[in-house]
Amino acid sequence: MTGQPFDPQLRAARFLPRTIITARTLPTLRVLTKLARRARRPDAQIVAVDNDVSVHVFRPAESRPRTPALLWIHGGGMVLGDAAQDSTFCRKVADELNIVVVSVEYRLAPEHPFPAPLEDCYTALQWLARQPDIDPARIAIGGESAGGGLAAALALLTKERGETHPVLQLVSYPMLDDRTTTRTEIDARQFRLWSPASNRFGWGAYLGPATTVSPLAAPARYDDLSGLPPAWIGIGTNDLFYDETVSYAERLQQAGVPCTLHLAPGGYHNFAGTEPKAAISQAFTKAQLTALDQALNAD
């Protein structure tokens, strides 16, 4: 942990709580998520992939044959959130890069612990690769927070199964390592929105009653990171996931995987989504778009 002061343009950092998601708050937060979903402007085609998985499909204004695509995985600590919550980001990516963006509605823990959420994301990826208007050789996978962890795990799963070959993993503030829950030296005062208490709850819900932790559940535990798609990884320095994210990026590089690590000094967890107009957030989003554009649209 760096212990840096918050970026001065992230003005909400003074008021945001350190902890939002807990076992006690989860029922209320889920109700609020449903209400917010009803209030959102419908901006995507909703498609049922199977009985468990659906996707929100964001198409660009101008269609083209064999379009590149991004499979997007939302955050929420493995226990909260929905495919619609990042609609603004997904629409921006689809329009500015002229690609299809598909956001996954995966099942949530604790009702559906590992491997259900990861398998749902894999099902959505396989569905996307089969679509006749999509170029299966130009698909990126991405997500933020829990979705970033799932995107990293999905890259590992696609490597193991060999059916689909993403060209980029776009990972923001990722939830990668359950072992962070056992650290006792962390000063929680530098965090916002996701605290050690939330982390313990989220990982406990996702891992369920398992006595051993699969490296596909916690990608930081995976031994051999070679052969994975190139990665863009972004994190703020005032994020609980900072250490595990930097370590994972370094291990990717050591394994020969091209990896860009974008560090945002003074950024808290999900700062770009919370305060998108701040210069640090705009730079973060621009870096994401640039990485996607280079991976998906370069000749």
Image (tube, grey):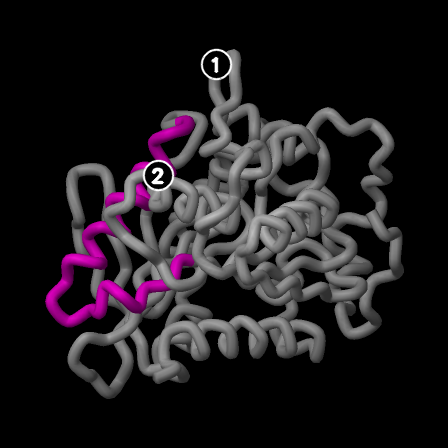
Snapshot quadrant of residue 221: top right
> Could you say where residue 26 lies in the image, as x and y percent from the top left?
53, 34
Task: Give x and y (percent) for residue 274.
Answer: 62, 63
Q: Give the tally of numbered discs.
A: 2
Tell me: 177 left or right of 75.
right
Which amino acid lies under the numbered mark 2 shown in the image of this protein? Glu
The tag on residue 209 is 1
Neighbourhood count class around disc 2 (C-alpha, 10 Å): few under 14, some 14–19, many 20 upward: few
Residue 126: give x, y in percent of width and height: 22, 50
Q: Which contiguous range is marked in magenta?
A: 113-141
Residue at 77% over, 29% down: 183
From the image, which quarter does the C terminus lie in? Answer: bottom left
Q: Verify CB contact (< 8 Å) between mark 1 and mark 2.
A: no
Residue at 58%, 41% in the rendered image: 176
In the rendered image, residue 130 lying in the magenta stretch gets the answer yes
Question: Which mark, by number, is residue 160?
Answer: 2
